[in-house]
Amino acid sequence: DDLGYAPCTPAACMEILDHYGIDCKGKKAVVIGRSLVVGKPAAMMLMKKNATVTICHTKTVDTAAVCREADIIISAAGVLKSLTKDYVREGQVVIDVSMNWDAEKVTAKGVGGMSGDAVYAEVEPIVDAITPVPGGVGSVTTSVLVGHVVGAAMRKYA
């Protein structure tokens, strides 16, 4: 049975973990965000890789404490500067999925402004790895989408 294609952005998160040899088996993972497009599918994909997954959302009590216990954090809250140094510790991998507009990052020429959930400058020195925004998950998402399109075309005309 063909169940179709997984949503591109959470699939991109898994591609990044695979590419860098990050084994999810037995790891604690936290997904911040419970959307049907990113949060829930990312949690399902992490569980398929044998991670123990917690989903945090707007009603989660003390999300920072929950995140500090994780080995892997996927932040898909869509809230600028919501993932601070208080959420992380050494040894973690952070995948920042969100795309937010940060007026403080816009240059005099009107360039820049894209930012994730993480306060990158304060989180990056603490964790083992973090994806940047822009230049991280979005780029891989595009590649996953192209792969889906090519795969669908090949199936149709094979």
Image (cartoon, rainbow, N blue to C red):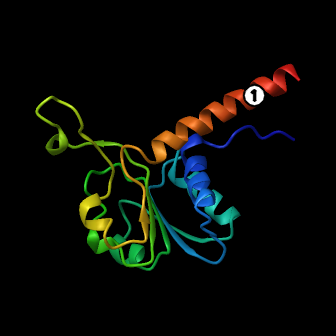
Amino acid at dot 1: Ala
Q: Position of residue 128 (x, y in %)?
A: 43, 71
Q: Looking at the image, which residue is at 32% across and 54% down? A: 117
- Provide the secondary structure element on which disc 1 rests: helix
Q: In which quadrant is the N terminus drawn?
A: top right
Q: Where is mark 1, residue-wise?
A: 152
Q: Nearer the viewer, residue 79 or 25?
A: 25
In the picture provided, is 114 more to the left or to the right than 93?
A: left
Q: Nearer the viewer, residue 65 or 61?
A: 65
List the single residue furthest toward the left: 108
Q: Position of residue 59 (x, y in %)?
A: 36, 64
Q: Looking at the image, which residue is at 71% across and 28% down? A: 150
Q: Looking at the image, which residue is at 38% across and 71% down? A: 127
Q: Can you see residue 70?
A: yes
In the picture provided, is 87 more to the left or to the right than 37?
A: left
Q: Position of residue 35 (x, y in %)?
A: 48, 49
Q: In which quadrant is the C terminus drawn?
A: top right
Q: Position of residue 145 (x, y in %)?
A: 60, 34
Looking at the rendering, which quadrant does residue 26 occupy? bottom right
In the picture provided, is 59 more to the left or to the right than 111?
A: right
Q: Looking at the image, which residue is at 57% across and 47% down? A: 12
Q: Is residue 102 above or below residue 74?
A: above
Q: Can you see residue 119?
A: no
